[in-house]
Image (tube, rainbow, N blue to C red):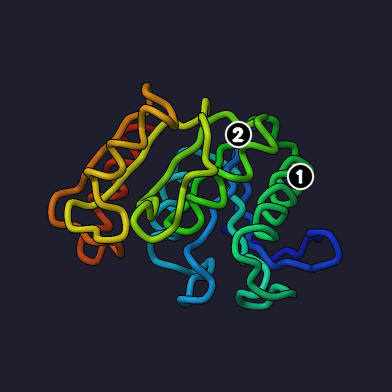
Amino acid sequence: MEEKIFFQSGELQLEGLLGKGTGDCGVVISHPHTLFGGEMYNPVVESMLKVYLSFGYTTLRFNFRGAGNSQGSFDEGKGEQADILSAIDCIKKHGITQVDLAGYSFGAWVNSLAYQRHKDIKRQVMVAPPVAFIDFKNVAALSALYLIVGGSRDEYAPPELIRKMIPVWNPSAHFEVIEGADHFFFGHSDELESVLRRYL
């Protein structure tokens, strides 16, 4: 069961949903692009949430600045990095000592940038990192990157482009491609959840 919470990111108040787990492991889950309707109730975010909760993680999904009832406005990924760092601090205040970062699409990109500024992360999971839509050139080595999940028909996150990035990000990261899935995983949420369960 999740509870609505609010936390600060600088001068802005952000809204989130906190799900209490059973141990000291937690995950911050970030949503897709705000200007294209991305928010914390996104179906892919909810699939990720469902799997983490099933393993007893404390979960925090939240709306970036400018999304839902979070204050502020879209900041092209810069302010959103601060939002991620604030979310990590927030979840740690609930007794979490081991934090995972999980992001879908734009959220995967922001997580990767924020990781450069906060490397105290246990594992990072990317779902459909949009390498054909957003420039990932500022994303360096991601030592915590554990799993990348993509779709074979994803024009924003083409598997062939992701494969070229993995040696830069983390050569030991696992990469799973769901056959027939597009960027939104319509009709493939069960397969997405199955992949996440297998690795978590």
Is 196 situated left or right of 41 in this image? Answer: left
Q: Tell me the amino acid under the disc marked 1.
A: Asp
Report x, y in % for residue 182: 23, 61
Q: Which is in the foreground here, disc 1 or disc 2?
A: 1
Q: Residues within 10 Å of mark 1 (few under 14, many from 20)?
A: some
Question: Real-space Cα distance between discs 1 and 2?
Answer: 14 Å
Residue farthest left in this picture? 180
* 69 over 97 or under it: above or below: below
Q: Are marks 1 and 2 in contact (CB under 8 Å)?
A: no
Residue for point 54% across, 72% down? 34
Residue for point 70% across, 60% down? 79
Label 1 secondary element: helix
Is 46 situated left or right of 87 in this image? Answer: left
When asked about the image quadrant of residue 68, the answer is bottom right
Q: Residues within 10 Å of mark 2 (few under 14, many from 20)?
A: many
* 12 over 18 or under it: above or below: below
Report x, y in % for residue 16: 66, 63
Residue for point 14% across, 50% down? 179
Report x, y in % for residue 124: 50, 37
Which residue is the site of mark 1? 89
Q: Earlier in the sequence, mark 1 or mark 2?
A: 2
Q: Tell me the amino acid under the disc marked 2.
A: Cys
Report x, y in % for residue 187: 20, 64
Residue farthest right in this picture? 11
Residue for point 53% across, 66% down? 40
Is 64 situated left or right of 171 in this image? Answer: right
Q: Quadrant of the C terminus?
A: top left
> Label for residue 25?
2
Residues 193 and 54: in front is 193
Is 175 situated left or right of 117 in this image? Answer: left
Label 2 secondary element: strand
Residues 150 and 20: in front is 150
